[in-house]
Image (tube, rainbow, N blue to C red):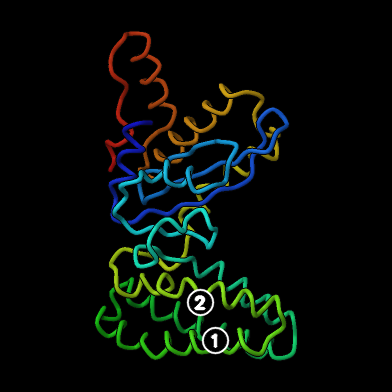
Amino acid sequence: MDEARAYVQAQPAVHQDETGWWQKHARAWLWVASTAVVAVFLIVKSRGKAVAQTMQGEDFRGTLISDRWCAYNWVHALKRQVCWAHLVREFEGFVERGGEAKRLGELLLAEVFVLFEWWHLARDGLLQRATFQRKMRPLMREVERLLSEAADVCPKKVAGTAREILKLKDALWTFVYTEDVEPTNNVAERDLRHAVIWRKTSFGTQSEDGSRFVERILTVVMSLRKQERNVLDYLTTALESHLDGTPALSLLLGT
C-alpha cells in the first residue's frame, strides 16, 4: 500500500474522487486516487481537504483531475482539471430549468459536443496538438462568455452555479495545454464502481479493521486489473510471503 501510494503521488496526472461509505452505522467516505495502472483507496470519516492532501501528498506537483468539490481547492487551478462530464450534467440541469437557462444550457452543451469531438481526435493522433489548441481558443472564449451571461440573466440557482464554475475557469482548460491530462474524471469513477456495488450489498464495514481490509483489497484488485495481472496468483503469493517472512510481491511490477 505504501509503495502504491508513493507511486500515485509521484505521477504527472492523477484522478481523484470519493463516495459515501458506512462504518459501523456511521457516515464515512471511500476515497480513490487513480492512474492508468494503479488505484489507491482510503476509508475515513471525513470528506475534507486534509484527506485529499493525504491521498496526494502535500508536496504533490502533478495535475489533479477531479470534480468541483471544495476539498480539492488546495490544488492551484492551473494544476487542476475539472471534470467535463460533471459539467455536462450541470448544463443539462440548466436546460431543465427552462427559459433563458434552457437557451444557454443548450448552447453550452453544443460547445461541449465539439470540445469532446476535437479532443478525441487529438488524443487519437488524428489532430495535431497545436491545431487542437488553436481550434479550442474561440470555443474556450465562447464557453466562458455563455457562463458569464448565465451568471447575469438566469435564475438564482443557475446563476450561482455559473459563477462557481467561472471561479475555476483556469481549471477548465488544463487538458488543452497539458499532455496526458484528460477532460473527465472517468478513470476514478470507473475505479469506484466495484466499491459502490460492494457497499450496496454489504452495507459498508463494521470496524476500523474492516475498513482497512476493504481499502487494501480494493487497491490490490483494481491495480492488478489495470495491469492485466492475475489477482488470485498475486494474493496467493502475498500470503505465502507473509508466512515465510519474505517481502510481498510488488503491486508495481506492471507499471
The residue nearer to you, when weighing 155 against 18, is 155
Q: In x, y percent, where is residue 56?
A: 38, 46
Which residue type does callout 1 highlight?
Ser
Question: Is residue 22 or residue 161 the one in the foreground?
Answer: 161
Quadrant of the image for the N terminus?
A: top left
Q: Earlier in the sequence, mark 2 or mark 1?
A: 1
The residue positioned 52% from the left and 27% from the top of the image is 212
Q: Is residue 155 left or right of residue 90?
A: right
Element on which disc 2 rests: helix
- Quarter of the image with the C terminus is top left
Image: 31 above or below 203: below
Write down the quadrant of residue 38 in the picture: top left
Pointer 2 local density, CA inside 10 Å: few below 14, some 14–19, many at least 20 = some
Residue 105 image label: none
The percent position of residue 201, horizontal first and vertical second, equals: 70, 36
Contact, mark 2 vs mark 1 (Cβ under 8 Å)? yes
How many marks on residues?
A: 2
Which residue lies under the disc numbered 2? Answer: 166
Residue position marked by numbered label 1 in the rendering: 148
The residue located at (50%, 89%) in the rendering is 145
Task: Determine whether the residue tagged by mark 1 lies in a helix, strand or loop.
Answer: helix
Identified at 37% across, 85% down, the residue is: 136
Q: Position of residue 159 (x, y in %)?
A: 64, 80
Q: What type is the residue that disc 2 sits on?
A: Leu
Position above or below: 193 against 243? below
